[in-house]
Image: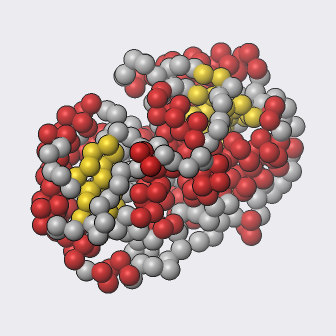
Amino acid sequence: MKKQPYSGPILVVAGTRPEVIKLAPVYLEARNRLGGARVCWVSTGQHEELERETLARFAIKPDHCLNAGAGGALLNLNEKVVRGITALCEAIDPALAIVQGDTVSAFAGAFAAFHQHLPVAHVEAGLRSGDNRDPFPEEAYRRMIDDMASLRFAPTPGAAANLVAEGCREDTIFVTGNTAIDALALVDKLAAPCAPANVPVIPNGQRLVFVTLHRRESWGTKLDGMCRALRDIVERFDDIHVVLPLHVNPRVRETVEPILRDQPRITLTEPLDYAACHSLIRTAHLILTDSGGIQEEAPSYHVPVLVLRDVTERPEAVRDGLAVLVGTDRQDVYSIASRWLDDPALRAGMQGIDNPFGDGQAATRIVTALERFLTGKTPLLTNCEQFSR
Ligand code: UDP
């Protein structure tokens, strides 16, 4: 690995909407404290359009674009990102690469940087489902990234414990909170107010049920069953209105649209701008989702989340009574959602519980540790400086 003190730029590698959202606070904080010239945003282009729109939300202009997105297959994308990052490293001789989460962009970015003998910093380290094939390929990717990383920024004590149990050195693991929570405050500060046209209007007196569904492991029969459950729920409760932003993937649309399109109290939209999405999350009565990010964000607004997955690598919200792991079975989705819509006491019981995923200070902690790492100071973060909820 390169030797300290480290000079050269820091690469922030991202290619999907959630990576942009979760790395924006780190990038902006790092530029503030280390100087604009020291920090480069590298856009892989994995989710080309969503990535571009989300970058604009945070007023980030990428320094380097790999344009690796078009072409579909995960292996193609992997290869293009590895080649792109390798060429970039050869051209600008960076000090370190930061990746986030478990996407192809994160894995290929870490893999290429590792091969260049660069230190890799992994934001959102240590999340585990415990099954290498579910979610596929994310669980394997995040494990391999954590193996390659020199700095492991775990969002919660539980994620840090997963890393310790796998034998990672404890002085490379830092509990920071999840940067998704920092992003919530940032977007309120930075974003131009969203045009009303972008936010679906919920008729007066109706309770908003916000839904997102996109995960690869649910495509086909499970997704079909969950959509039918949603329809059944809307037919049972005449005071609810469902908003479901459709994922861009055609496999998701071809299942969701025929089942839900013609119910007047279900609004299917294009993917929402991040600020518009937040105005809905904040005001929802109930959320049904398979999204990782939304599981982390909703507890900040004390909105209950029903997790439509068979496993979650974010057990903290379930532990604290802020979320329920429902699974993907049609009858379970129907009966558990009905219970939450019927019984106001369930929702009342979760008010006042702090978000276990973060306190909005994750990026500050991460950049403090990075600054000390680059200049050879230890400890990178003391125990008191870490997130402890
Ligand atoms: N999101 C958004 N618009 C939408 C749906 C989601 O801005 O129409 C945001 C959401 O608030 C969260 C992130 O995108 O911050 C989650 O992305 P996604 O569900 O695609 O990925 P995951 O979190 O499951 O990796």
382 lies left or right of 105: right
Quadrant holding the N terminus: top right
Q: Residue at x 43, y 19 (%)?
A: 70
Above or below for 6 versus 353: above
Q: Residue 195: image x %, image y %?
A: 48, 46
* Total numbered circles: 0
Q: In the figure, is residue 60 to the left or right of 74?
A: right
Task: Look at the image and tell me whether residue 209 can be seen.
Answer: no
Figure quadrant of the C terminus: bottom right
Q: Is residue 40 left or right of residue 322?
A: right
Q: Quadrant of residue 5?
A: top right
Q: Image quadrant of residue 109?
A: top right
Q: Residue at x 27, y 45 (%)?
A: 268
Residue 202 sits in quarter: bottom left
Residue ID at (59%, 51%): 187
Q: Which residue occupies the foreground of this view, 145 or 83? A: 83
Residue at 69 percent across and 26 percent down: it is 63
Query: Which colour style is shown?
Result: secondary structure
Residue 118 is situated, as x and y percent measured from the top left of the image, at 71, 31
Residue 364 horizontal/vertical position (percent): 73, 55
